[in-house]
């Protein structure tokens, strides 16, 4: 099971990234858990300085920008 993590304070872009990640995972037929991390100390523990950010299984794949569904797909596939 993939663990898809959305790092951000809960702003509109963070919510849109979560929605896009969910759509990408569903379209790929992945088994996943989507986790939203909003605690600033935990976010900085990932080394992320700009949100929103996307991490997969604890590894940051992108930060500081909103990705669309098609851009997320290759980042969450095996």
Image (tube, rainbow, N blue to C red):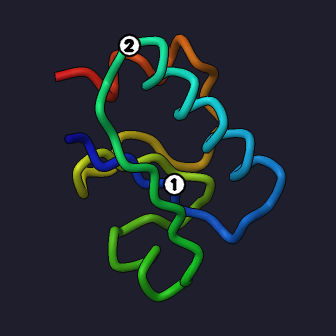
- Secondary structure beneath disc 1? strand
Dots 2, 1 in contact, CB < 8 A: no
Q: Quadrant of residue 69?
A: top right
Q: Residue at coordinates 66% horizontally, 37% vertically from top-left?
A: 19
Residue 63 vs 76, above or below: the answer is: below
Q: Residue at coordinates 38% horizontally, 13% vertically from top-left?
A: 28
Nearer the observer, disc 2 or disc 1?
2
The image shows a total of numbered marks equal to: 2
Residue 46 vs 29, above or below: the answer is: below
Residue located beneath label 2 in the image = 28
| Placement of the N terminus among the 4 image quadrants | top left
| Placement of the C terminus among the 4 image quadrants | top left
Residue located beneath label 1 in the image = 6
Foreground pick, 45 / 22: 22
Percent position of residue 76, x then y: 32, 28
Outermost residue, right side? 12
Percent position of residue 16, x then y: 73, 40
Give the crowd class for mark 1: few <14, some 14-19, many >=20 residues within 10 Å: many
Outermost residue, left side? 78
Foreground pick, 45 / 72: 72
Taking the image as shown, residue 51 lies to the left or right of residue 59, namely right
Q: Residue at coordinates 41% horizontally, 17% vertically from top-left?
A: 73
- Secondary structure beneath disc 2? helix
Q: Residue at coordinates 50% horizontally, 21% vertically from top-left?
A: 24
Give the crowd class for mark 2: few <14, some 14-19, many >=20 residues within 10 Å: few
Quote the CA–CA distance across marks 2 and 1. 18 Å
Taking the image as shown, residue 77 lies to the left or right of residue 25, namely left
Disc on the earlier residue, 2 or 1: 1
């Amino acid at each position: 099971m993939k663990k898809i993590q959305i790092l951000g304070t809960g702003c509109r872009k963070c919510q849109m990234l979560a929605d896009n990640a969910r759509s990408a995972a569903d379209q790929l037929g992945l088994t996943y858990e989507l986790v939203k991390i909003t605690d600033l100390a935990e976010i900085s523990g990932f080394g992320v300085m700009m949100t929103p950010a996307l991490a997969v299984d604890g590894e940051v794949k992108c930060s500081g920008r909103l990705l669309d569904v098609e851009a997320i797909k290759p980042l969450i596939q095996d």
